[in-house]
Image (spheres, rainbow, N blue to C red):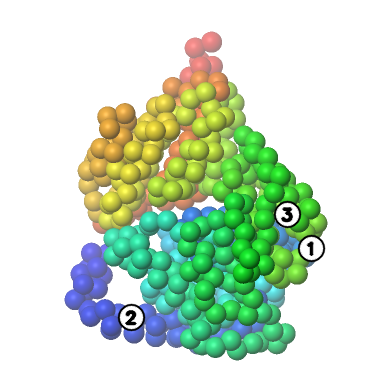
Amino acid sequence: MKVKKEIKKIIPPVLLSIYHFLLAWLGAAIYRFPSKEMTVIGVTGTSGKSTVVELIHQLFTGAGQKTAALSSIAFHLGQDFQPNQLKMTMPGRFHLQRFLAQAKKEKCQLAVVEVTSEGILQYRHRFIDFDSLVFTNLSPEHIERHGGFENYKRTKGKLFAIWSKRGMKQKPPAPEKTIIVNLDDPQASYFSSFSAERKLGYGIERMSEKIESLKAEKIVLRARSSTFEVRGEKFSLALPGQFNISNALAAITVGYAQGLDFSRMAQSLAKVKNIPGRLELVADYPFQVVVDYAHHPAALEKIYQTLHPFAKRLICVLGSCGGGRDKWKRPVLGEIAARYCQRLIITNEDPYDEDPREIVAQVAKGAGGKAEEILDRREAIQTALSSALPGDIVIITGKGSESLMCLAGGKKIPWDDRQIVQEELDRSSGRKAEKT
């Protein structure tokens, strides 16, 4: 791992760029450009991407279409489900093209791909024949990797520029090349400015006079669910939070662009019980325990804002921002958590080759003395659970549905926050039974 990093430092960026581009072409060529044989939807943004991919998959599966989907959560090939254990949201070029080739072999009519800024930098998106592109939102993330927010935004924009550069070569039958943007995000106008045959927007707060838009209305937010209407059709969602309504609205807009019926989409979304590792309810009695992937400031604050009104106390186990990445946000995460959490425990996440104690200390600094530091993640979770009372909500963030923890020297150990919670709750119940 270290050798690979050192080699990258001495190779000129231009040569690295050519290398990544050629790999992308080679991967597509080996698997015979499989994306040309199906409708392909790309989803990008800072947060919500995985949830939107999962919801789109549910919509089209519910409509009777065989669908493939690839996200940080899972790989879907029709009814086949495999958790994503790669520790990569967007796999490498060969893995990605092989997945699309398998989708073609399985006769999938549609494929949904989560697209990351790192994937765009390495041309993993190239030679995929996208038909629709979805922009969810944009907030500061991967700033050190990109050298600033504007560079991060422009990197995302390269995905939307693919039709401008390559032209709009249609495949029979030829769906319109479509851009779909979240109108509530300040960057909506930037992402809707790229060339496309059709442009659609969605939103809760804002609409557009320039492009056709779908709006969520008559919104009702509950502790573990929400309802809203789109063009007179009522949607019931077993996912809490206004941000999840926005995620659902993104998927609905994709379905609308592809000709799905609103009533059918409402029936499909009503069947979604949870999204793995995204505000996932792990335990409900005598207090709630929720696990979420949130690892950047905007997402973390949305999670806390969603849960806080329904909790007597919010007890937070805060992951400490993986080693080697986005050090700027560590104290920011701590500051946000200190504002919402009645008890805050900062713990290890994925330290890689950094000193985990130093990472935790940097997060704790932002909390201004309001946080406990417990390096061992299991101990941190056990401590949080042991202090919870009826009416409290324990929220564990940073890893979500991930199944591995990354340590120094490239070592990976099995880890699943949800499993750890169940083990600690079972152990606690066993201790209580022994006492009685």
The N terminus sits in image quarter? bottom left
Tell me how far mark 1 sits from mark 2, CA to CA.
43 Å
Q: Which residue is mark 2?
A: 17
173 or 189, nearer to the observer: 189
Q: Earlier in the sequence, mark 1 or mark 2?
A: 2
Q: Locate residue 383 relative to residue 289 in the image: left or right.
A: left
Q: Which residue is mark 3?
A: 230
Q: Residue at x 72, y 85 (%)?
A: 173
SS of the residue under disc 1: loop
Q: Measuring from the top left, give residue 75's x and y in whole percent.
A: 57, 63
Q: Amino acid at mark 3?
A: Val
Between disc 3 and disc 1, the foreground one is 3
Q: Measuring from the top left, give residue 147's x and y in whole percent.
A: 29, 65
Q: Earlier in the sequence, mark 3 or mark 2?
A: 2
- Tag 3–tag 2 contact (CB < 8 Å): no
Q: Measuring from the top left, give residue 122's x and y in whole percent.
A: 38, 75
Q: Amino acid at mark 1?
A: Asp
Q: Which mark is residue 261?
A: 1
Q: Residue at x 55, y 56 (%)?
A: 184
Tell me the crowding category of disc 1: few under 14, some 14 to 19, or many 20 or more residues within 10 angstroms, Cα based: few
Q: Amino acid at mark 2?
A: Ser
Placement of 382 over or under 27, stated as above or below: above
Tell me the crowding category of disc 2: few under 14, some 14 to 19, or many 20 or more residues within 10 angstroms, Cα based: some
Q: Residue at x 50, y 48 (%)?
A: 401
Q: Measuring from the top left, give residue 106's x and y in whole percent.
A: 67, 74
Q: Which mark is residue 167?
A: none
SS of the residue under disc 3: strand
Q: Residue at x 48, y 86 (%)?
A: 165
Tell me how far mark 3 sits from mark 2, CA to CA.
43 Å
- Residue 75 seen from this side: no
Residue reaching furthest to the top: 436
Q: Earlier in the sequence, mark 3 or mark 1?
A: 3
